[in-house]
Image (cartoon, rainbow, N blue to C red):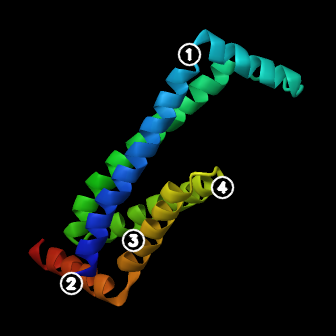
Amino acid sequence: MTLTIAVILQWIAAIISIIGAVGLILGAFATLDSGVRDQIDNALSSEGVTGISAGAITGGVFIAGLVVAAIAVIRVIVAMSLARGHNWARILISVFAILSLLGGIGTLLGGNWLTGIVSIVVEVVILWLLWNASSSAYIKVKTAERAVAG
């Protein structure tokens, strides 16, 4: 049962990640406005930053949004394998959960308290649900069933 809850929370975490990805992508598009681009370049120049342009920042933010969205989609696909008791899926989702946990901490430090706290709580709960005794027993049984079947 706890593994089922972990799978459901994967969907919730993926939705949170998609929201963050959309925010990043929209933020990147917002910097395409020439006025915004000039403000970024002026701010970089006034801080003495060289070698980085508004265009590079736009590209980086856009790519970050695409990466976050891709991880969210992969996470949902892998969650389906987790529901069938594949240990590799549990390990991969744990890696994604840890990365998302770090992203949640960054979101929290960036001042978006609600999204950051919700993300952190969801990821910690997912990690506990993935690795508790009940989930481990389920995965062990499913692994044994697959070995016998074939």
Q: Quadrant of the C terminus?
A: bottom left
Q: Give me the disc on residue 141.
A: 2
Which residue carries the number 4 mark? 109
The mark lying in front, picked from 2 and 1, is 1
**Residue farthest right in this picture:** 48
Mark 4 nearby-residue class (10 Å; few <14, some 14–19, many ≥20): few
Q: Nearer the viewer, residue 112 or 11?
A: 112
Residue 53 can be seen, yes or no: no
Q: Residue at x 65, y 26 (%)?
A: 57
Name above or below for residue 33 compared with residue 2.
Answer: above
Which residue carries the number 1 mark? 32
Q: Nearer the viewer, residue 67 or 27?
A: 27
Q: CA distance from mark 2 to mark 1?
A: 53 Å
The mark lying in front, picked from 3 and 2, is 3
Residue 17 can be seen, yes or no: yes
Q: CA distance from mark 4 to mark 3?
A: 22 Å
Q: Are marks 3 and 2 in contact (CB under 8 Å)?
A: no
Please tell me whether mark 1 sits on a helix, a strand or a loop: loop
Mark 1 nearby-residue class (10 Å; few <14, some 14–19, many ≥20): some
- Residue type beneath disc 3: Ile
Q: Residue 13, position in %: x, y?
A: 38, 58
Q: Residue 86, position in %: x, y?
A: 27, 69
Which residue carries the number 3 mark? 126
Please tell me whether mark 4 sits on a helix, a strand or a loop: helix
Q: Residue at x 36, y 78 (%)?
A: 129
**Residue farthest left in this picture:** 149
Q: CA distance from mark 4 to mark 2?
A: 41 Å
Q: Quadrant of the N terminus?
A: bottom left
The mark lying in front, picked from 4 and 2, is 4
